[in-house]
Image (cartoon, grey):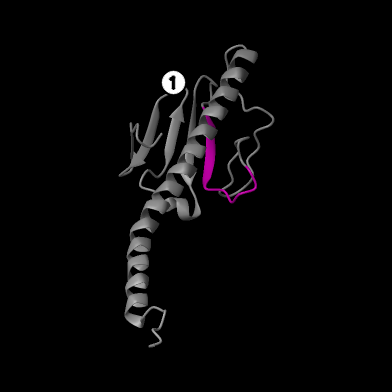
Amino acid sequence: MKNKNQGITLIELLIVVAIIALLATQAYPIYQRYIYRTHRQTASADLMAIQQMLTQQYHLNNGSYTLPKNLKPKGNCQTVSPNTSGTPPRYRIQIEITENKQAYTLTAIPCANQRKDHCGTLRLDSNGFKSVLQSGTFIANGQCF
């Protein structure tokens, strides 16, 4: 009776490794886009939460926008939104209130790896207009919000 080896050959192993490598090269960019989109949606939700706080302050202050006391900037590339967690910051949120306190602009500027996202800087104003910075100009872009 002959003993038949019960194993795989080196060629079979190399083919399996090559297939796994091919799948990984296709999957990683898709995963990165998903991560960018998730962080962008968090920043968008943060902007809307701040918008809601500013609107409440507007009604409390008889028609003038003021920065709520619980919104304190935390330094470079730190969001001021209450929705932040212990994860590294992905956006720095700027709040600009006009001198007459009748309007504001909220801007989410990407930090760190989030700068590679195609949407870039997000902006929301007191009229509810959502825009994205592209080629030095803010334009409406529903896909990024």
- On whether residue 87 falls in the magenta region, the answer is yes
- Percent across and percent down for residue 72 are 66, 37
Q: Of helix, strand and loop, which one carries label 1?
A: loop
Q: Is residue 69 left or right of residue 25?
A: right
From what the image shows, is residue 77 above or below residue 43?
below
In the displayed structure, 29 sits above or below 121; it is below
* Position in image of residue 133 (x %, y %): 36, 40
Given the current orientation, which residue lies at the most extreme top position? 62
Kind of residue at badge 1 = Asn
The residue that label 1 is drawn on is: 127
Q: Position of residue 57 (x, y in %)?
A: 62, 19
Q: Residue at x 33, y 31 (%)?
A: 140
Residue at 52 percent of width and 28 percent of height: 48
Position of 18 relative to 99 (above/below)? below
Q: Quadrant of the C terminus?
A: top left
Report the span colored magenta.
Answer: 85-97
Give yes or no for residue 78 being in the magenta stretch: no
Which residue in the rendered view is the most extreme toward the right?
Answer: 69
Q: Residue at x 37, y 56 (%)?
A: 27
Q: Is residue 44 left or right of residue 67?
A: left
Q: Tell which of 24 and 92 is nearer to you.
A: 24
Q: Relative to 79, does residue 113 appear above or below in the rendering?
A: below
- Near mark 1 (Cα within 10 A), the count class, few <14, some 14-19 or many ≥20, is few
Q: Residue at x 37, y 76 (%)?
A: 13
